[in-house]
Image (tube, grey):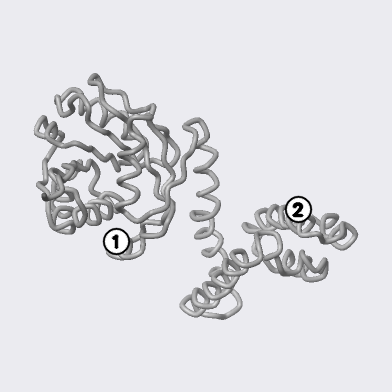
Amino acid sequence: MPIKKTNISIIGAGKVGKTIGYLLARKRYCINYIINKNYSSSKSACRFIGSGKALPSISSDMQQSDLIIITVPDSEIIRVCKRLTDAKAIRNGQLLIHCSGSQSSSIIKCAKKIVVGSIHFVYSFADPSLAVKTLSGSYAVYEGDEKATSRIMAVIKDLKTIPIRIKPREKLVYHSACVFASNFVVTLESIGVKLMQGSGINELNAVKILLSLSKQTLFNIDKCGVFNALTGPVERGDVKTVLGHLKYIPRRYKSIYKLLTRLTVDVARKKGISYSRVRAISKIL
């Protein structure tokens, strides 16, 4: 007996929507509709996914979908839910999931008796063509109605991601951690590249050098733990080097260098480095 496919509509034709749609279309799911503010983006997403019909706006045709996945920016989710209700696009028993990392499923408010949840994929969706090959094995943090749990877990399993359940009220704290570990890494790397260019190394080589160093640091964190992975002048108590950095770093970066050095002193202490070894660095900041 053939397996019954789950009908899906996706609202939001960006990088996340394209990636999820592409992967689920190759499992036990049938992509019904793709909706985006920009109709041409909806059509482009359908071509990328290889199935589905592009709609210019939310429509009552979406009632035939068992699952609606909302992948729009956080600020648009409430507006989308209102539009779903106004367009009579939902029906009792449907599952609505949004993919926000900072918002819980409680912001999904529709007139019908639907089941709601959220899944945040702890993954940097820079390029859908790459993401469809590498999303597998990453983490999927979820929450929602108890009735939604088994269906959410099925989606996570079919995407070959690792489920982690979270309390709805903790999502903002959780998401801020993701920002530190991903978004701010890009910012710090960009600062590093600019500083290295100041030493006469061209941008291409600066990126290669710092990327190699960053990969080694992450490898050390994986193998040794966060605190034991720390190396460098703060860990050594090297006051002279820190003072040298502060002398040559452009003014616009000095405050962030000082703040990060203070925080790194705390990490060094947690690694077990004696206070006497790092005390002198704390005094010069």
Rendering quarter of residue 273: bottom right
| Residue positioned most to the front | 1
| Residue positioned most to the right | 276
Image position of 24 (left or right of 283): left
Above or below residue 272? Residue 211 is: below
Find numbered disc 2 in the image and state the secondary structure of the residue it sits on.
helix
Give the number of callouts. 2
Above or below residue 186? Residue 58 is: above
Which residue does the image show at 20% across and 24% down from the upper left? 92
Rendering quarter of residue 27: bottom left
Q: Position of residue 112 (x, y in %)?
A: 23, 21
Which sits earlier in the primary sequence, circle 2 or circle 1? 1
Under mark 2, the amino acid is Asp
Image position of 57 (left or right of 123): left
Name the one closer to the observer, 144 or 280. Answer: 144
Q: Which residue is mark 1?
A: 132
Count residues near mark 2 (Cα–Cα under 10 Å), then give few for <14, some for 14-19, many for 20+.
some
Above or below residue 12? Residue 23 is: below
The disc label shown at residue 266, or none:
2
Name the one closer to the observer, 188 or 96. Answer: 96
Which residue does the image show at 77% across and 64% down from the upper left? 234
Name the one closer to the observer, 239 or 100. Answer: 100
Q: Position of residue 175 (x, y in %)?
A: 49, 43
Q: Position of residue 191 (x, y in %)?
A: 56, 63
Find numbered disc 1 in the image and state the secondary structure of the residue it sits on.
helix
Q: Position of residue 176 (x, y in %)?
A: 53, 44
Q: Is there a contact, CB below 8 Å, between mark 2 and mark 1?
A: no
